[in-house]
Image: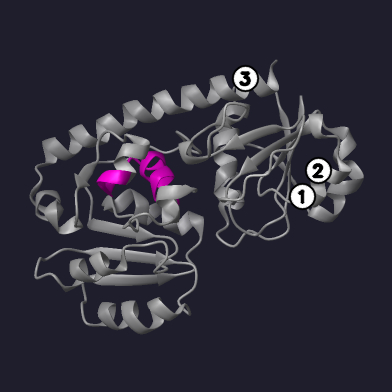
Amino acid sequence: MKIAYYEPNYYHSEILASFLEYFKRYSCRLTVYYDEDLSKWIVYYRQFYHFEEKPTRLFFSEYTLYDHIIIGSFDTGTSEIIHPSKIIVVHAAHEIVNIKNAQIIVLTPLNYRPNFYYILPIHQFVDTHIHKKIDFIIIGHIYVQYRDTKDLMNFLNSNLKFSLHIFVRKASKKYIKHKLIPMVQKNPNIVFHENVKAQELEGYLKSAKFILPFVKKNGPYHNDRLTGSIALAYNYLLPPILDRKTQNIYQIPGSLVYENSIMEVIPQALQMSSSEYARMVDQLRVEREKIVNNNIQMLDKIFRK
């Protein structure tokens, strides 16, 4: 079976891993078409699965060679050229476009519809150790419309002693530049990173104890899209600390949950015994395997029907 993975955007490439988990079980020849990958996830995935890489300019002259075409970040122009029965659309963002005769995959139950396939974009390529050096890690966009920045500031202003690493793609955003960075500069235990690539990021993910999504109440991550922190929690067996609504959406075992503020559970996280922490990681590992197996069943309905 010949598969093309077409990624017209320069992000969302981390989604590819959930398909690699599936393809490694079958004899699939995979070609990934992309031009730029800001976080270098595609390069990082080379160590787990062999696939060919080509620029997107070749895609429209070669797409007829493939049995199936996966569109990583959907664009309407592609579906107008390619016969929809060949297309598998992955909706990584909030805009859901239903194309007749195409297979639609969504990455969060918030966007599920009866004629769609839902998979959580995770993999089992990486295991972890229990002895961690970093207490907390924050990864991704830190915009006021996405994150609970008020609770984040309460956390950073607390008198508790902890180590924290924060990773963003760009530090030029107004909130990060004027609010977050000045706060970080006052605390030597908080380290700020900009534009770190996947291979380097892996080391930090393996060294951290908890991941903090800081989801804004009734914001986009509560309504129509997945925060990448959920996938990273499973991929690197990194227990998340979640607000109640996010936990109700994803039902993640091995997580700490708060009602109103993350400060309700931060002391528990800092004082947790190694045996209790190991139990949380084991819960994540078991659930991760279940989700990957469920993803395989969903993808079987598309690729092996």
* Residue visible at 36% across and 62% down in the picture: 147
The circle on residue 300 is 3
The circle on residue 79 is 2
Query: In the rendered image of this protein, does residue 51 appear above or below residue 268?
Result: above
Residue 116 visible? The answer is yes
What range of the chain is rendered magenta? 228-245
Residue 26 visible? The answer is no
Please, what secondary structure does the residue beneath circle 1 have? helix
* Residue visible at 85% across and 45% down in the picture: 80
**Disc 2 to disc 3, C-alpha distance:** 22 Å
Mark whose residue sits in front, 2 or 3: 2
Query: In the rendered image of this protein, does residue 37 appear above or below residue 120?
Result: below
**Where is mark 1, residue-wise?**
76
- Residue 115 covered by magenta stretch: no
The type of residue carrying mark 2 is Ser
Residue situated furthest top in the rendering? 305
Residue situated furthest right in the rendering? 61
**Disc 1 to disc 3, C-alpha distance:** 25 Å
The type of residue carrying mark 3 is Asp
* Residue visible at 81% across and 34% down in the picture: 84
For residue 185, side relative to residue 51 (left or right): left
Q: Residues within 10 Å of mark 2 (few under 14, many from 20)?
A: some
Quarter of the image with the N terminus is top right
Q: Residues within 10 Å of mark 1 (few under 14, many from 20)?
A: few
- Could you tell me residue 156's position as x and y percent? 21, 70
- Could you tell me residue 173's position as x and y percent? 47, 77
Q: Are marks 2 and 1 in contact (CB under 8 Å)?
A: yes
Occupied quadrant, residue 23: top right
